[in-house]
Image: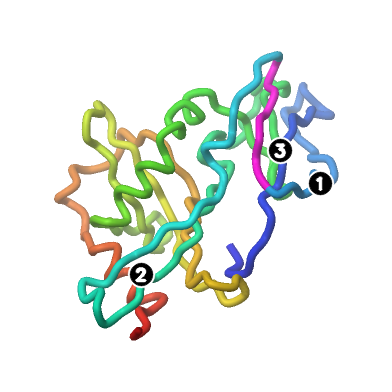
Amino acid sequence: MEDSARPVLSIRPIASNDAASGLIVPPAPPVCTTDRDTVAINGSTYALAHVRPFSVNIEHFDQAKYRAIKLVVTFSHHCFSQEIKRGDDPTHFIVEDGEPRRFCAERHAWSSDLANLVRYHVNGKAYESRDGNGIWNHFFYAADGRTIPYAIYFRLTQATNIPGVDGVLHVVSAYENSQLLPRHKYQSVRFAMHAGKLIGFKAK
């Protein structure tokens, strides 16, 4: 994600032009809007206001000396959709930011409390793991009251073109992940330290 401000794109269903082969050719990118509202899937309407951007402040432990880092939190449509696979129902396809995906009612339901979980976990720890390509992933590990942990994968970048904002926390994806190891198996870091390292706290 670029570190400059950008509008969140609206989403709308798309249709397959070759249902037999499972190939999907997305239409032209949808018109930009200032926020998400709803999406209609196969006759049902789903609210998306809970995955609109919001801001959050990250405090230094020495609040008298350093000012808080202000972040804008944004969400990818991966938080309520899945990769399109051969044979998927085209009436469930959506596109955002030029990327076609399949709307997932389960992920959408899980995302209903996603903003609150982010607000909670930025005051605690983030976790790190390497993917199959050896690239580090950062995520919040939400497990309280859940049978399967809810992984919130994010990318944190500086914001150089948003007045009054220091960084962007972009939630790349979020879903229940039964493949996660117990929390203590992962390297952890205080999120405030992670933000301070990447963005930097400034003296008052």
Tell which circle, 2 or 1, labels the residue nearer the N-terminal end: 1
Which quadrant, please, contains the C terminus? Answer: bottom left
User: Mark 2 packing: few (<14 Cα in 10 Å), some, or many (20+)?
Assistant: many
Label 2 secondary element: helix
Percent from the top left, x then y, of residue 196?
Answer: 33, 75
Front residue of this view, candidates 203 and 51: 203
Left or right: 188 with respect to 81?
left
- The amino acid sitting under disc 1 is Val
Front residue of this view, candidates 203 and 15: 203
- The amino acid sitting under disc 3 is Ile
Residues in magenta? Answer: 35-42
Q: Is residue 138 above or below residue 24?
A: below
* Residue at the image position 36 percent from the left and 49 percent from the top: 119
Numbered badge on residue 31: 1
User: Label 2, label 1: how many angstroms apart (C-alpha)?
Assistant: 33 Å
* Residue at the image position 41 percent from the left and 50 percent from the top: 153
User: Label 2, label 3: how many angstroms apart (C-alpha)?
Assistant: 31 Å
Percent from the top left, x then y, of residue 154?
Answer: 43, 55
Q: Is residue 13 magenta?
A: no
Q: Which residue lies under the disc numbered 2?
A: 195
Percent from the top left, x then y, of residue 18?
Answer: 81, 27
Front residue of this view, candidates 116 and 98: 116
Percent from the top left, x then y, of residue 8?
Answer: 66, 50
